[in-house]
Image (cartoon, helix red, strand yellow):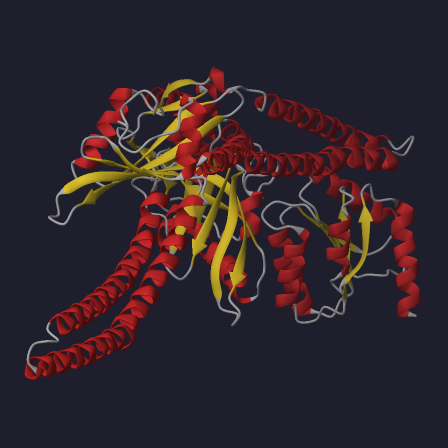
Amino acid sequence: MIKNTLNQQNVSFAHIRKTIIFGFFLAGFLVIFLTIGMVVFLNEAQNDSITKDLTSRQSFENLKHFLTLAMISFTLTLVGLYKFLAKPIMETLRVNFEELNRQAEQSTSILENTSDLIWAIDSDFKLLAFNSSFAKLMKYQGGNSPKIGDSILSKNYSMLSFSIKKKLYEKALAGESFETDFKLNGDDRTQYFELSFHPIYDKNKAVSGCSVFRKNITLRVEMYRELEKKEGFLKEAQEIANIGHWNWNMVTDEIQWSDQLYKVFGLDYQTFEANYEGLMNVIHPEDQEAFGVSVENCLTKKDLLDIVHRIVMPDGSIRYVHQKGKAYFLEDETPSRMAGTIQDVTQLEEARQQNIRQYNELQNFVYIISHNVRAPIATLQSLVDIIEPGNESLNAEILPSIETTVETLDRTIKDLNYSLALKNIQEKNFEEVDLRKVFRDIEHLLAIHIDASKATIEYNLSKAPKVKGIKSYFTNILFNLVMNSIDYKAEDRPLHIKITSQSNSQEGMEIIVADNGKGMDLNSEKRKRIFDMYGRLSGTSNGRGMGLYLAKTQVEVMNGAICVESEPNRGTTFKVVF
Amino acid sequence: MQKFTYDTVYIVDDNNTANLVHEHLLKRICVAPQIKSFTNPLRALKKLNLELLADEKQILVLLDIHMPEMNGFEFLNAFSLFSVNNELVDVVMVSSSIDEKEIQQGLEYPIVRKIITKPLKETQLLDFIKQKGIISA
């Protein structure tokens, strides 16, 4: 019906034109007719009054001439008026109307050549106008062509349920402009539509009706659904691989993190602001510099970012992540953004470190075999070599050496067996061990040595008196550390051993055994060797080089670490960390 | 009068039995008139430096690699640091372990003439001395 409204404008122009021309013609004919009538009448009158005086005849003649002249000049004036005034006005009108018409045609074609439905109603819900798409659909659905003046609420126009439909129109008629979506479940395909309502205002700025556009957005919705599905797959993949991705806009210093990345970092995306500084704070302090260098190389040398580093989780635990990334540059070679992935590789990294540890242990084992097992065999071989048959005094000298060497060999093999057996424990067998009880046992075992060396032992166990592990292992570890202090006491002063247990910064605990003994000068080689099997640092003591090795083995199988600090003539401090 | 290749032999090994065996071997092949055994390498080092200061003597050191307190390489480092005259000293390193790395490390010291894997054999010692004779001739 929009089309009809627009055509009426065209009709009214032709109408105006016709009226003007008709007016002019009518006026012209009227004047001519009147003039002719007048002339005829005057002629009649002249003939009737022929007998009358000449003067009146003369005046009739004069009047006739005057009328003829008046008629001619009036006709000329009319013609002139039409040509010089009415015609240009009509021409201007015609141009204006044509322009209007053209614009209207364009608007119409825009409104008509769309699959979108467009219609308007007045404040009484009566149809004011609609485009042909609307008409087509209504006819298809209800069988009847829509008519201006129909109530939009009637069931012929049943796109939505009555109550919803009414509510929406009322909202628009209340002066609100809005959009709403709805879906139609078709036989083979669900269709999605967007309805936009706009109130129509009259001259007094009061709402006189509303216009409605209905747009089919099925494709858009389907594409969005498809995208959502793909995003879901991506999310799933990230979750399964525990891999997250990020995108760093360097201009604004904003980092976009995928959901999984927040999970990898154990952070809440609502409270954590992702930027470079925030990322740096997540990275383990000892790895921050290496990470910074990697990023720098990525930006300056265009290297790929590829680094495994530690992160500190909000609960303080430490995990390993593998970062891979790439920088993107503007035309002038300045970096604009970086993107990359972060994968949790804690298990892998722990397995790798376990491998290294086991490799080192194996190396140590091979070393022990090649040296400590082979040494007594070599000695036996040479002892047998120097035996001289008949030389009784020599042979008598050699025999005890053979005996002790065989004993050494036997003990070494027993030591090896024992240290291997130590490693076969499981975490589920760990129990809570009271260190105070452990030290009571040790004092009992070492009573003679403590007395002989006049040692005093100071305990500070109250801060962390209990530890999880295997009691006999703790007894052995701490026995060896105390024994070590007694073995290496300074000659010139009484031995004092200070034993402390406390919690440390990494939410673990540590046991410290510090003495004021003779101490030693530790280089990195010696620091390592002190805990090796048979790795004695001193030739003056009677130690076999097993005590600290076993202590270290037992600490490590209980997931701990042991380290040593020492200063000559000041004392030695062993620290066991769990 | 018997001719010896060296004036003194130092045996440095933390294993008493090894020292006993090596002493016996050296005596049997008459390498030097004087043989001194040490289980403490530090003491051996002190004695060796004193002896070199006192007199120009040809000295052979039979040095074990694996010893507590000071291993063979540490002994060599300390020795080249303190000794005034080490052209007179030959070192033969002995070890029960057959570690390629340690052999390489030992050969880096010019003073080390030979590295022998335990057990030390009479023939190995004789070969070494014979070679030494050719060099000094």
Quadrant of the drawing holding the N terminus of chain B: bottom right
Q: Position of residue A100 (x, y in %)?
A: 33, 59
Q: Is residue A498 visible?
A: no
Q: Is residue A319 above or below residue A410?
A: below
Give the position of the C terminus of chain B as an image quadrant.
bottom right
Residue A40 seen in the figure: yes
Residue at 46%, 41% (x, y): give it.
A563
Seen from the viewer's position, the closer of residues A29 and B54 is A29
Give the image location of residue A570, x and y in percent: 38, 50
Compared with B93, B89 (above or below) is below
Kindly identify the residue that appears in the image at 34 percent across and 25 percent down: A157
Identify which residue, A357 or A404, lies in the foreground. Answer: A357
Using the image as rendered, state which of residue A176 and residue B88 is in the foreground: A176
Q: Is residue B25 left or right of residue A432?
A: right
Where on the picture, by quarter, is residue A74? bottom left
Above or below: residue A141 compared with residue A25: above
Residue B74 position within the rendered picture, expressed as x and y whole percent measured from the top left: 63, 56
